Image (spheres, rainbow, N blue to C red):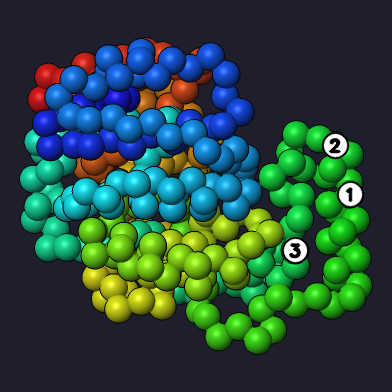
Amino acid sequence: MLQLLDHPQNDIYLHIDSSAKGWDAAALQTSVRQGTLTVLSKFRPAWGSEALVDATLLLLATATETPHAYYHLLSGMDLPLRSQDEIHAFFAKAEQAEFVDFKTETVSTDLLRDRLQTYHFMQSARQRYPLVRKLDDLSLRLQSLLQVNRRKCCTVRFQKGSQWFSITQAFAEYCLAHAAEYRRYFRFSKCSDELFIQTLLQNSPFLANRFSREYDDEHATMRFIDWDRGTSSSPYVFRSEDYDRILQSGMLFARKFDERVDAEIIRRIAQSVSNR
């Protein structure tokens, strides 16, 4: 993916899981010859953990040291579907819109209760260790019995959506300036990466700048993601037979791709983008 993102106008900031082994910074640098690549490795962003928010804020803090028109959050399982010149042209016409997804107009009480009302002290480790999962479940049940409610005196209006976004310099700076204020609501939470940026936008002067005012709209982020064939916690991994559907989606990016599942679809899309 780095080669497809490489462009003289692009500065790439890559965060690698701090527990990852065997990666070579020098080898990564060889994939970026026209733009710049900055590699960070500070957090271990386990599924559903607040470290995902921390890693996002670290990337934004590092990237905004040099002003940019837009900041695009992508995962290592994403691919661009258009050339970088086409993507730049699209965002140049976007009139400083914020590409942030809202799933619904109002977040359900059940979802907020599950993710934010109690303290998920062991969220970062519960996926790896069965004993930790049992202890965390016990902690959550005890908090429920004690009627713990972290949101009781909170006046913030929460929002939820896809964690992948494209945001302007101005909103990125706003997020960093107000991160500490909002971060406390998400400390020891569950899956806050789908709530943090959305909640900041919902309670900011930038709310009116949302590119799409619709809900659960893929145009909100210009990313093609197939949840219909996925699971409750992960979107569908594209295969070669999805090639035409992906390129005809009209989106700028797509996910999820995994070379262990189907390397051919990655090769074909990379070739298509390179030839544009």
Query: Which image quadrant is residue 73 in?
Result: top left
Which element is circle 1 on?
helix
How far apart marks 3 and 1 lie (CA) works out to 13 Å
- Against 263, residue 48 (above or below) is below
**x, y percent for residue 135:** 89, 49
Provide the residue designation for mark 2. 130
Tell me which amino acid carries mark 2.
Pro
How far apart marks 3 and 2 lie (CA) works out to 19 Å
Provide the residue designation for mark 1. 135
Q: Earlier in the sequence, mark 1 or mark 2?
A: 2
- Circle 2 packing at 10 Å, graded few (<14), some (14-19), many (20+), is few
The answer to whether any part of residue 255 appears in the image is no
Q: Earlier in the sequence, mark 3 or mark 2?
A: 3
Q: Quadrant of the C terminus?
A: top left
**x, y percent for residue 125:** 74, 41
Provide the residue designation for mark 3. 119
Tell me which amino acid carries mark 1.
Leu
